Amino acid sequence: MSLIQDDLVDYEKAMEQMTDLVGQRQRDERPDTLWLLSHPQVYTVGRRTLQEHLPDPSHGIPVVSTGRGGQLTYHGPGQLVGYLIVKLGEGEGIVDYVREVELRLVEALGALGVPAERRDTPPGSELLTGVWTRETGRKIVSIGMRQSRGVTSHGFALNVDGDLTPWDWAVPCGMPEVDMTSLQREAPAAASMDRVRAAVAEAFEAS
């Protein structure tokens, strides 16, 4: 898998570039790609996000609608975002691929010394997509993806060492009770952005 790395990229600019990357992958002009980056402060909302889950506008953080699955997510400095532009295999759906993404991120977190797990969604519950810490039961990775003409887009957000307060100003992932966490909170020694980027790239076999 091809690896692209950037630091801070404006969310809407990133969406334009991601659309270009998806088109290139659909036309087989580029290989499967993992794009690692971070965004300035922004809330992004999926198609099913409820009005009452949105943040109070007085905090001054913009809210942007996005075409991915999933609910509200916060992005900001100190969070590692990974966009996955991947051609799905024959008979493989987006839900299958999201499971694979969860397991690869569990592997990356394990390599960083943070035991983590994915969760199955009980019938009738809000979708438990993402990754949780095994010892404290907190959510450390949010995932929201979609596919178009057999190619995935969007991806995951892993909280490394950023401010977690903005998560408390809204309802993340459609789950009012969720306790969002970061590597800084769970295992401060592992909260090096360079180390996290390297572990994630290795878990996705991206270079």
Image (cartoon, rainbow, N blue to C red):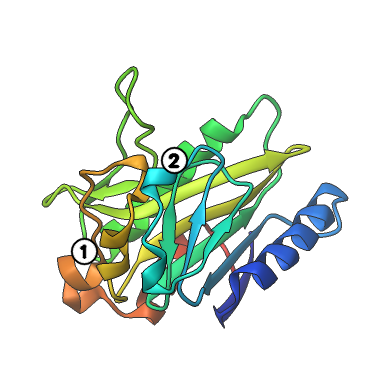
Q: Which of 124 and 131 is in front in this view?
A: 124
Residue assigned mark 2: 50
- Mark 1 surroundings within 10 Å by alpha-carbon count, few (fewer than 14), some (14 through 19), many (20 or more): some
Say which residue appears at 82% left-offset and 54% top-offset.
23
Q: Distance between the residues labelled 2 and 1?
A: 36 Å
| Amino acid, disc 2 | Leu
> Where does residue 136 sit, x and y in percent of width and height?
12, 52
Could you tell me the amino acid type at mark 1?
Gly
Could you tell me how many numbered marks the image carries? 2
Q: Name the residue under label 1.
A: 113
Residue furthest toward the left? 135
The image shows residue 164 at horizontal and vertical percentages of: 27, 68
Whether residue 111 is situated above or below residue 41 in the rendered picture: above
Q: Where is residue 70 in the image (x, y as percent from the top left)?
A: 48, 42
Q: Where is residue 188 in the image (x, y as percent from the top left)?
A: 18, 76
Q: In which quarter of the image is residue 195?
A: bottom left
Q: Would residue 154 be found to the left or right of residue 135 on screen?
A: right
* Image side of residue 119 versus residue 138, left or right: right
